[in-house]
Image (cartoon, rainbow, N blue to C red):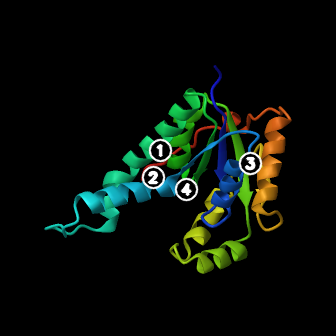
Amino acid sequence: MKRGLIVFLNGTSSSGKTSISTELINQKEISFYHLSIDEFFNNYNDFVNNKFPDEPPRGIDHQVVSQIIDHSILSVYHSTIKLLSEMGFNVIVDSIIANDKSFNDFYDVLIDHPILFVGVRCSKEEITRREQSRGDRVIGLAHSQFDYIYSYDEYDLEVNTEELSPVQCADKILSFIKSDQDYSVFKNLSKREIIVS
């Protein structure tokens, strides 16, 4: 049995990745599982809040919490993507490549798997408008991610969510998959050098 295809949607917060994912799941030609990094973190937070509802005796800064758990949650996220692909399931990765370390972590775990690397594009003005209208995002988050995320200029396929609806974006991705074109961009990228200061 061959490994499942990983459709890696790379775009800022509020760029339209989840809307495209929903449309890919709703179509009936190719089955997909959707793995959202937001859901991984939300599920962990729900677990902690339900299991330990009391106020902690010692408060700690949010940055300290992030330093303690973020890498572990991301590691489980990456491993889950790999596991599903190994089991033959097609997976939609709804995440961001936030920095060079994040890229390297994805690269190390997933390089040997079939990955369709899709750039989900949207202007700064539009993501700012979407972010403000959503109400569930920190204002400025997408703007802060923009330059790094869109520094990747090599994709197997790009979709612009200002020009295309989520259905049209999903159709474009499905057409690419069914065309049997090679998806090799992610494999041809190189690990990023991380400078520790």
In the image, residue 191 lies at what x, y percent?
58, 39
- Give the residue pinned by disc 1: 77
| Above or below, 140 relative to 30 | below
In the figure, residue 166 lies in which quadrant? bottom right
Closer to us: mark 3 or mark 2?
3
| Marked residue nearer the N-terminal end (4 or 1) | 1
In the image, residue 14 lies at what x, y percent?
63, 67
Question: Is disc 3 placed on a helix, strand or loop?
Answer: loop
Q: In front: 151, or 130?
A: 130
In the figure, residue 114 lies in which quadrant? top right
Q: Residue at x 58, y 32 (%)?
A: 85
Residue 40 numbered mark, or none: 2
- Give the residue pinned by disc 3: 27
What kind of residue is marked 1? Tyr
Q: Residue furthest top?
A: 1
| Marked residue nearer the N-terminal end (1 or 2) | 2
Q: Residue furthest front?
A: 28
Question: Is disc 4 placed on a helix, strand or loop?
Answer: loop
- Image quadrant for the N terminus? top right
Q: Residue furthest left?
A: 57
